[in-house]
Amino acid sequence: MRFKMILASSLSKKIYMSIAGLVWSAFLLVHLLGNLQLLNPDRDPFNKYSYFLTHQTGEFIYLAEFLLAFFFITHFLYAIWVQIGNWRARPHGYSMVRWAKNTSKRSLGSVTMIYTGALVLIFLVLHLIHFKYGEVVYYTPKGYTHQIRDMYFTVMEFFKNPVNVFFYVAVMVLLGFHLSHGAWSAFQSLGLSGKRFTPFIYTIGVLFAIVVAVGFVFLPLWIYFTRGGAL
Amino acid sequence: MEKKKLTIHLKVWRQKDADSKGKFVNYTVNDVNPDMSFLEMLDVLNEELIKKDEEPIEFDNDCREGICGMCGSVINGTAHGPQSGMTTCDVRMRMFKDGETIVVEPFRARAFPVIKDLAVDRSALDRIMSKGGYTSVRTGGVPEALSVPVPKPNADEAMDMAACIGCGACVAACPNASAALFVGAKVSHLALLPQGRPEAARRVERMVAQMDEEGFGACSNHGECEAVCPKEISITAIGRMRREYLKAMFK
Ligand code: HEM
Ligand code: SF4
Ligand code: FES
């Protein structure tokens, strides 16, 4: 196959988007599990985990960050490219659209992918500013002889502000919509489909979206209502 | 017993030719027999229009029994009308209520320019077919039956895929005007049979390239196509096309 086609055919674009989307979906799950340590009233485990990732994995962290950035950028650049092509494919829209019910998988999530995606993109930039490049406070955890960053503190402070809580909750709900269609769609885009497999992966995809969205919605709310914001 | 006749209000897209702007025009058809087909109702309206010395509404049709793939309009917002698994010519007037307003639009896609009113040019699908909707065979005597074994499940599935009549409803219903279901059906039909294997990689590559060239959108897996397809072709056809494409990528 010609190189141009491998890079830019309508099928190829979706293949790369789906790989990148799946990598990010997996990352989200790991990220959520790691963040559950915020529920622990003891700040040490979360901070040690954070310290481990950033200081004790050697070069690995740079590779991981590079790959995440690479896949994120791939995903949204292809997303914009695909979406513009899709808009151009129907210059004159219908005056009346009634979704076919039957077996259709069209949903609120599937028709808003570009909008939920765009908000996630803005969110990601802000998210890095809030935490990774946010306020840095050092402390010495039990059993350590040196200071490490108190990420736990930064997070708790951040979610004392109800505006921040609202923003995070809203975007995580939208992310849930993105994944409610995206997760199964990625498998279909890779040709992983079949009479029995498709209904199965569709259900798994929706469940995955619910778990991720509920998890990330729960954390800020929990912090706000138990750690001072609402008190 | 005589069935109650219907009064039907229509909002029909009228467009002189590809370069004109086009607009909706309202009509009322009285005394519609509920057992009439939708196209027969349009025939009745057209006769009235001709008597009044007006231009009749142009629409495509041929067999009027759901097998040729010529007909096709978007009726009340859904390609081939409100019920699944039907062509436009299968639609019956009893599916509508007395006094209902029915909106009738052509299939809309950049790759399907309007010829006139409801008739659109779907030759883009033919050009995709010309890129690989065939197998090359040896000429000469008829080969011995059963000399090429075909597993029964493959034969069945290839038959389901071959049921595609090329009507273009999948394109019309797709939010992206993607032809993925049509191309998926054509690619799968031949890829499932041993006779189609030798050219499988070349076929999918050339047909996908032509599909993109014609200006169809990309498939976002909404699945509207499967829901409106008169032959109920499953989107697993699109999955199979992508598997064939992935194989071809590494060739
Ligand atoms: C955490 C971040 C994200 C994750 C986990 C994610 C996940 C996914 C997945 C799994 C798909 C399905 C891919 C396919 O069917 O091939 C998808 C589709 C899509 N994503 Fe994302 N995405 C993310 C961020 C974004 C961003 C930042 C944008 C940018 C604007 C975006 C725009 C889209 C669009 C437009 C589609 C649909 C493409 C189509 O089929 O038409 N996503 N996403
Ligand atoms: S796949 Fe179905 S809807 Fe599409 S052209 Fe073929 S018969 Fe028509
Ligand atoms: S006119 Fe032949 S399928 Fe409708």
Image: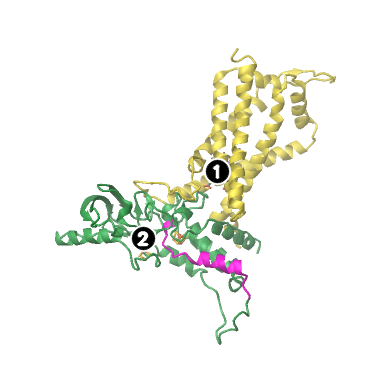
Mark 2 and ligand 3: say if the CB distance to the nearest ligand atom is below 8 Å.
Answer: yes
Q: Is residue A48 highlighted in magenta? A: no
- Residue holding disc 1: A181
Q: Could you tell me if the residues under marks 1 and 2 are in contact, i.e. CB atoms within 8 Å?
A: no
Q: Nearer the viewer, residue A164 or A75?
A: A164
Q: Is residue A29 left or right of residue B218?
A: right
For image coordinates 61% across by 39% down, the residue present is A207
Q: Is residue B246 left or right of residue B8?
A: right
Give me the chain letter of mark 2. Answer: B
**Chain B tint in image:** green
Give me the chain letter of mark 1. Answer: A
| Above-or-below relation of B238 to B197 | above
Q: Which chain is yellow?
A: A
Q: Residue furthest top?
A: A231
Q: Nearer the viewer, residue A193 or B108?
A: A193
Quadrant of residue B88 within the rendered picture: bottom left
Q: Is residue B80 left or right of residue A36?
A: left
- Residue holding disc 2: B90
Q: Is residue B81 left or right of residue B43?
A: right
Task: Write down the region rendered in magenta.
Answer: B149-169
Neighbourhood count class around disc 2 (C-alpha, 10 Å): few under 14, some 14–19, many 20 upward: many
Q: Amino acid at mark 1?
A: His
Tell me residue B136's x, y (percent): 55, 76
Tell me residue A28's x, y (percent): 65, 36
Neighbourhood count class around disc 1 (C-alpha, 10 Å): few under 14, some 14–19, many 20 upward: many
Q: Is residue B166 highlighted in magenta? A: yes
Quadrant of residue A121 within the rendered picture: top right
Residue A153, visible in the rendered structure: yes
Q: Residue furthest left?
A: B52
Mark 1 and ligand 1: say if the CB distance to the nearest ligand atom is below 8 Å.
Answer: yes
